[in-house]
Image (cartoon, rainbow, N blue to C red):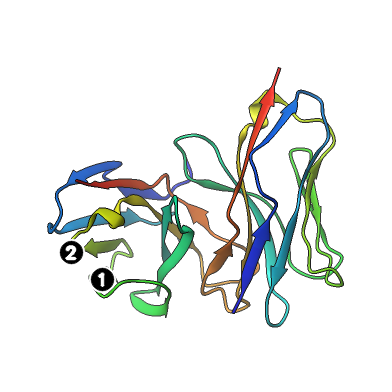
Amino acid sequence: DSGVTQTPKHLITATGQRVTLRCSPRSGDLSVYWYQQSLDQGLQFLIQYYNGEERAKGNILERFSAQQFPDLHSELNLSSLELGDSALYFCASSVVPDGEQGCTFGSGTRLTVV
Amino acid sequence: GNSVTQMEGPVTLSEEAFLTINCTYTATGYPSLFWYVQYPGEGLQLLLKATKADDKGSNKGFEATYRKETTSFHLEKGSVQVSDSAVYFCALSDRDGSRLTFGEGTQLTVNP
């Protein structure tokens, strides 16, 4: 157990729908990252939050949004879902944004859009 | 922008064989370099890291040396075990810690 908790583990939904993925960072970690892992694009950075504020944005679609709450948990919202959004979504956390330490990953949420 | 290139897989070895997975990178400045491992059905686990040129990261018998002159961070292990079967990702981090850039991943299968 890495200490980063993601729910749900699996999600199956239809095209056009909206889903919310949840992440609780490791105790004491202030920074949360979201990554998407798909067969065709590999592991892609989506977005980073630090202490409730958006800090960096990667290849995140406009249909996707995220936020980090005062208790430091984070949610990734995916809307108007398409078949191509099927992927494994990882949350990771770190104490602070520190390029030398890396980050700790959760076990992921597998999203299947049908 | 930053990028990481890993050797193509999959790689299949017999137990106790020597392992090398090549990784090269392109980056501005001096990034930190990492190897992550993903076992089936699990998330990524940090295997080892190096933060400056000529640093050697090591863990569980795996090693990798940060080579600035060749922009490489090759993963090696002298004697692999069946339990090492997993997908291995090379990654680099922006200095400000904003994100990790990953390679494509290399699937390793070790047969008894």
Relative to B32, say whether A38 is above or below: above
Q: Residue furthest top?
A: B112
Residue assigned mark 2: A79
Q: Which x, y percent locates residue A110?
A: 32, 45
Residue assigned mark 1: A65
Name the one closer to the observer, B106 or A27: B106
Q: Residue at x 80, y 48 (%)?
A: B63
Q: Callout 1: few (<14), some (14-19), or many (20+) C-alpha neighbours within 10 Å?
A: some
Mark 1: secondary structure: strand
Q: Which x, y percent locates residue A82?
A: 22, 58
As shown in the figure, which amino acid type bears the numbered disc 2?
A: Ser
Q: Residue at x 58, y 55 (%)?
A: B104
What distance separates the C-alpha of mark 2 from that of mark 1? 9 Å
Find out whether the residues at labels 2 and 1 contact each other: C-beta distance under 8 Å: yes
As shown in the figure, which amino acid type bears the numbered disc 1?
A: Ser
**Subunit ID for the residue under disc 1:** A
Q: Give left or right: position of A110 versus A114.
A: right
Q: Give left or right: position of A36 versus A103.
A: left
Q: Residue at x 63, y 77 (%)?
A: B95
Residue A18 falls in image quadrant: bottom left
